[in-house]
Amino acid sequence: MSHTIGDYRLLSFDTYQDYLKSNTKTDAYKYLRNAKVVNQVVKLGYHTNVTIYEENQFYEIKEKLLEQMNPVSHHGLLFSSFMKGNDPALCALASREERNMQKKLSVNKIATTAQWLRYIRLYRLRG
């Protein structure tokens, strides 16, 4: 189903019936006069250049698209747990990472700013 990756138009429909109606021309009701027959004709892909999905495909693709747009984040994983260096600036970031994720930042912003300026100066002197 690689052709379905970018089919974001499916997100604009709440139900499969709405999706079918959007691909139906008004002339189809005029000539066929039966909604069931019109839906069958639409499912076959007549009078359209887009891919018409079956109901289970529609909901499956829509669910995958929503998952892509709103990924589940894993708050328990800290990137600092993979840090192997001894750079002072990175060590300071690693020590504050958990508090930053929990929105518990430093109350004393002046001291924190001074600490970062010191780390930046040390980093520039090393390089």
Image (cartoon, rainbow, N blue to C red):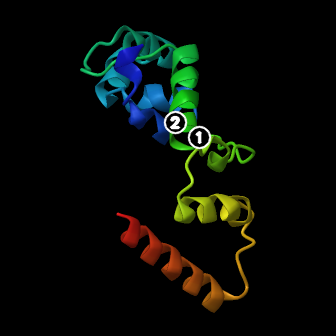
Question: Can you say whether 117 is above or below 54 in the image?
Answer: below
Which secondary structure, mark 2? helix
Q: Which amino acid does label 2 sit on?
A: Gln
Type of residue at label 1? Pro
Q: Name the residue under label 2.
A: 68
Kindly indicate the quadrant of the structure image that contains residue 37: top left
**Residue extending furthest front?**
126
What residue is rendered at 64% in x and 49% in y? 80
- Residue closer to the observer: 12 or 100: 100
> Looking at the picture, how far across and down is residue 55, in whole percent?
55, 17
Q: Position of residue 69 (x, y in %)?
A: 51, 42
In percent of width and height, residue 52 lies at 39, 17
| In front of the other: 92 or 32 | 92
Horizontally, residue 62 falls left or right of residue 105, namely left
With respect to residue 11, does 75 lie above or below?
A: below
Q: Do the residues labelled 1 and 2 touch (CB within 8 Å)?
A: yes
Residue 61 in percent (x, y) is at 51, 24
Query: Does dot 1 land on a helix, a strand or a loop?
Result: loop
Mark 1 highlights which residue? 71
10 Å crowding of disc 1: few (<14), some (14-19), many (20+): few
Q: Indicate left or right for 111 with 58 as reference.
A: right
Q: Which mark is residue 17?
A: none
